[in-house]
Image (cartoon, rainbow, N blue to C red):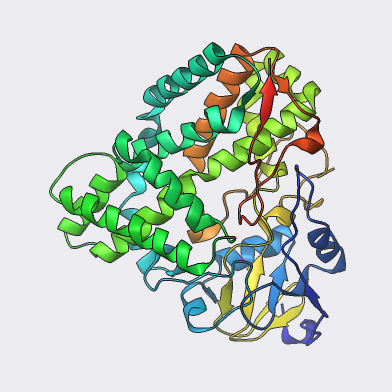
Amino acid sequence: MTDETITEFLPPIRHWPALELNGVDFDPVLTELMREGPVTRIQLPNGEGWAWLATRYDDVRTVTNDPRFSREAVMDQPVTRLAPHFIPQRGAVGFLDPPDHTRLRRSVAAAFTAKGVERIRDKSRRLLDELVDELVQDGPPADLTAAVLSPFPIAVICELMGVPAADRQDMHIWTQLILSSSHGAKVSEKAKNEMGAYFADLIGLREGGSGEDVASLLGAAVGRGEVTLDEAVGLAVLLQIGGEAVTNNSGQMFYLLLTRPDLAERLRAEPEIRPRAIDELLRYIPHRNAVGLSRIALEDVGIAGVRIRAGDPVYVSYLSANRDPDVFPYPETIDFDRSPNPHVSFGFGPHYCPGGMLARLESGLLIDALLDRLPGLSLAVPPEQVPFRKGALIRGPEALPVTW
């Protein structure tokens, strides 16, 4: 793109409040922003100033994969943001650029490969079967979130991380406090520090070990001098918190399947399409509120004909990218036959979520177990009475009352 085709146009700044959205409703503000242009300007409830927002699929992939947009530089300016208590930690993997980011990710990569995830498939299935056994034994009605969708991902991520079963509940409580915006900055920061101290001990204990879990891999990397203990702890905290995202994603998936019984019936009748259907559900569900972490332009860059100046903060919306009609025909339609389906629900570029394969494994096991073992599974209340999380960065039902 030549300088002649880049405009100095500054679109109006759009205030993007933290809306309390129920169900799988798509954010109406984001819908308007997508209509207004491929690149717009936004102001979120916290932080300072305004930021650019890229909403089109190709532009989202460009920004997230271009080294001219830096995560590390976010540390140096108070960018407008959704969370009130967002305190970036220097050296945390989410705020590193390559090559440091690459080095840190490499230390745990083996746990998140297809082979690493397969290692825990049988154990995960047994854990899930036990939870569903208890659900069936206790009988309907039940809260599917409390009975299965919350304890299952916690158990699986703890298994992958190498966290003993006795400590799962502590991990869950810390994660909820870190991810909530309703308890205030001090409570969230205290929970993050406590989880960090826990992982510092656990990784220290495994420094000379040869285990395949994440804490052992990090302990070995620290022992070899490839990563510092602080870096290892920051990564462990991020991975542990990310592991619970499956609770919210699967909560939205089952809310969708239970409010659209035609979709659930098709998955029961054609089990072979389930992996493809899970990807389509992942594309469709709005898994977060607003946007996540920003980047800073390190030099002037042209995106979609707009000049973004060096120092400007830039956000991308994976949710809007997943609804780009140029890439996903009829994006508002849930189409289990959609192929190809290059959705960006796990991000794109160097900061692509390492837990993508793990999330697919868990979603597949949940759909197999719950649809096959509970053929009469349905909502126990009208859809509008299902309570959704308030004040959370990640969207999902707080409870999912079901019967069968």
Residue 134 pos. (x, y %): 49, 17
Query: Residue placed farthest to the left in the image?
Result: 208
Residue 30 visible in rendering: yes
Residue 73 pos. (x, y %): 49, 79
Quadrant of the image containing the C terminus: top right
Q: With respect to residue 64, does 271 lie above or below?
A: above
For the residue pair 70 and 197, the one nearer the viewer reads as 197
Q: Is residue 29 left or right of residue 194?
A: right
Q: Residue at x 47, y 33 (%)?
A: 151
Residue 282 pos. (x, y %): 65, 40
Q: With respect to residue 237, does 83 lie above or below?
A: below
Residue 104 pos. (x, y %): 34, 60
Q: Is residue 351 left or right of residue 43?
A: left
Q: Residue at x 24, y 65 (%)?
A: 228
For the residue pair 144 and 39, the one nearer the viewer reads as 144
Number of marks in the rendered image: 0
Quadrant of the image containing the N terminus: bottom right
Q: Residue at x 69, y 72 (%)?
A: 44
Q: Is residue 142 left or right of residue 177?
A: right
User: Where on the picture, by quarter, is residue 373?
Assistant: top right
Q: With respect to residue 101, does 353 lie above or below?
A: above
User: Where on the picture, by quarter, is residue 250?
Assistant: top right
Residue 113 visible in rendering: no
Q: Residue at x 60, y 42 (%)?
A: 248
